[in-house]
Image: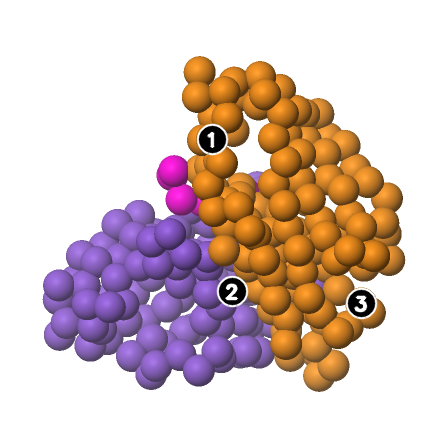
Chain colours: A purple, B orange
Amino acid sequence: DTEVTQTPKHLVMGMTNKKSLKCEQHMGHRAMYWYKQKAKKPPELMFVYSYEKLSINESVPSRFSPECPNSSLLNLHLHALQPEDSALYLCASSLHLAGEQFFGPGTRLTVL
Amino acid sequence: AQKVTQAQTEISVVEKEDVTLDCVYETRDTTYYLFWYKQPPSGELVFLIRRNSFDEQNEISGRYSWNFQKSTSSFNFTITASQVVDSAVYFCALSERRNNNAGNMLTFGGGTRLMVKP
């Protein structure tokens, strides 16, 4: 299995909702990442997990809460989001830090 | 601080033309990695190549080739005999190893949108 999967593909939520994005990989990778990508912009790093421990938090607002329950799974919990948080959220994994990152197809999030 | 510049925001070519996408980077580190990713309209970022700073050999993979020149801090990407399926946004990215092993942070360039017309 050489892919990163993300669910759901699309998500529409209100500003008071709580939702979660899920990312999964079965390549034995030990580093996992969340990125946010606005239209016509490059991806921006949000969080990095290495061996299930949070390694980098790029000053992301607390309404985004990452979780790494095991080496194959990465979640992003969303609460009280703003319309400007609407974007494509990409998950990636790499064998180790500094390895090439493989990306999932993304979750397109719309906050109303 | 590191920076990646892709000066061409959009390129339009006709099928079978060759096209080169430029990437210029800035870093103070001697150890770093350079990447190219393709993002088709579906949204998924597809890994194309990784180069480390000590390996200046050019690489060819089918119709794709990459020219890494440390002297000019450039890592350009050429598609030979372009096809409509090559239409996508292409991102060049730079990664530096952090001293505290806190992580591998990719800095992306702004991307180049390539449109290949039949």
Classed neighbour count for the residue bearing mark 3: other residues with Cα under 10 Å, few (<14), some (14–19), many (≥20): few
* Residue marked by disc 2: A33
Classed neighbour count for the residue bearing mark 1: other residues with Cα under 10 Å, few (<14), some (14–19), many (≥20): few
Q: Position of residue B44 (x, y in %)?
A: 45, 44
Whether label 2 touches label 1, CB < 8 Å: no
Which residue: 85% across, 49% down?
A: B56
Marks 2 and 1 share the same chain: no
Q: Quadrant of residue B17?
A: top right
Which residue: 82% across, 69% down?
A: B30
Q: Amino acid at mark 1?
A: Ser
Q: Position of residue A33 (x, y in %)?
A: 51, 64
Whole-number angstrom distance, CA of label 2 to CA of label 1? 32 Å
On what subunit does the disc labeled 1 rest? B
Residue B115 to residue A52: above or below: above
Which residue: 55% across, 57% down?
A: B109
Q: Amino acid at mark 2?
A: Tyr
Q: For the C terminus of chain A, which image quadrant?
A: bottom left
Q: Is residue B59 magenta?
A: no
* Residue marked by disc 3: B31
Mark 3 and mark 1 lie on one chain; the one further toward the N terminus is: 1
Q: Position of residue A88 (x, y in %)?
A: 34, 55
Q: Nearer the viewer, residue A39 or B112?
A: B112
For discs 2 and 1, the disc positioned in front in the rendered view: 1
Q: Is residue B109 visible?
A: yes
* Residue marked by disc 1: B12
For discs 2 and 3, the disc positioned in front in the rendered view: 3
| Magenta extent | B41-46
Q: Amino acid at mark 3?
A: Thr
Left or right relative to B115: residue B17? right
Whole-number angstrom distance, CA of label 3 to CA of label 1? 34 Å
